[in-house]
Image (cartoon, rainbow, N blue to C red):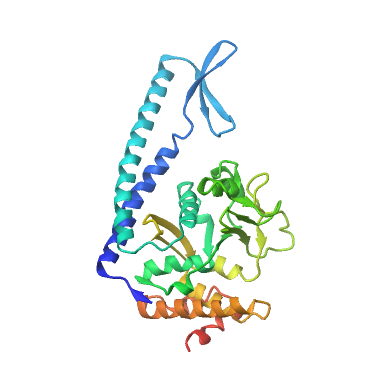
Amino acid sequence: MQNLSNQQRLHLVNTRQIYASYLSALRHLEGYRYALRWKTVRGVEYLFRPSSRVGDGRSLGRRSPALETVLALFEQGRADALAREVTLRAKLEEQARLNKALRLGRVPRVVSRILRQLDVQDLLGDFLVLGTQALYAFEVEAGVHFLLELLASGDIDRLYDTRKRLTLVSDRLDREGLLGLLKKADRSFEPLLKRGFRAANAEGFMVDLIIAPRRMHEGDPITFAEGDLVAAEVPGLQWLVNSLKLTTVAVDETGWPVPMRVPDPRAFALHKAWLSNQANREPLKRQRDLAQARAVATMVREHLPHLSFDEALTALHGDVRAMADALAE
């Protein structure tokens, strides 16, 4: 690991503060996504409020001076929201240039686009970033950079918490599903298989939708829209669902902020150590798992000493807890 300089740490703080304001502006602007408009039905004009791109919505009533005022206020509000977003975007672009010059950019651009889309839709809390990509979140919390050989990866796992209400997630995804959101980040994303759990873009970067194993009676597929990805169950993930979580803001390779929600670094290290001990795991992946587990465990001890491994063990399965001794070596 390499420690960040004081200047790099300062600009990480600045980036987080500007991004918080920018996210607030984006979400406010999102409320104006579907413009109010007059709609004529049988010769009578009604003020119509769309709620989706396919024309869903509701009427606010027949045209009247009061509704003309409502429309005027809506249009003024949208103009003000857009102006605020433009101003804050300019500040972020300036900060991004500084971040890039300071070599703070780490997260792959395609990953950052996906995560920002989730954040704007207020869905970041419904998913966890797993695997190698989670290391970027740990870096900014500890103020370090890991060696590059620990970080290279061509995919991102999205763990969906099935305790969340599917209908709420589907509504926020505008009935286009997770695949629709991926396409907003990169139009080239396509599912590899019909009703499969994995999508890939033109450059071969893959996104997996996965869930922890469920009970026998919970057999309905987890999907958010017609033709969307269908989540695959992966053994061992229930411990990460139940563990503590870390939400932070990292920086992508262009200098832009990246909102991230990942497992607690202690749970991540223990789970990776457990994976490295699984006989059915590919040998090359097992070696990488153990290297990442030890690197994250060392980072916690040296840079986040307030985080106790004993505290993190309670939510984890006995087999995972047993790996704590291996990480202490």
Exactly how many numbered labels are in the figure?
Answer: 0
Along the horizontal axis of the image, is 144 left or right of 197? Answer: left
| Residue 23 position (above or below residue 12) | above
| Residue 224 position (above or below residue 240) | above
The x and y percentages for residue 303 are 35, 76
Tell which residue pokes out farthest to the front in this image. 203
The answer to whether residue 161 is visible is no
The answer to whether residue 223 is visible is yes
Snapshot quadrant of residue 288: bottom right
The x and y percentages for residue 257 are 38, 55
> At x 33% / y 54%, what residue is drawn?
96
The x and y percentages for residue 141 are 37, 68
Snapshot quadrant of residue 90: top left
Instruction: Please state, as top left, top right, bottom left or bottom right, where the N terminus lies in the image.
Output: bottom left
Q: Nearer the viewer, residue 43 or 4?
A: 4
> At x 42% / y 23%, what residue is drawn?
71
| Residue 23 position (above or below residue 84) | below
Tell which residue pokes out farthest to the bottom in this image. 329
Tell which residue pokes out farthest to the top in this image. 43
Snapshot quadrant of residue 172: top right
Along the horizontal axis of the image, is 122 left or right of 101? Answer: right
Along the horizontal axis of the image, is 9 left or right of 185? Answer: left
> At x 54% / y 12%, what residue is drawn?
44
The x and y percentages for residue 264 are 47, 69
> At x 65% / y 66%, what residue is drawn?
234
| Residue 115 position (above or below residue 214) | above
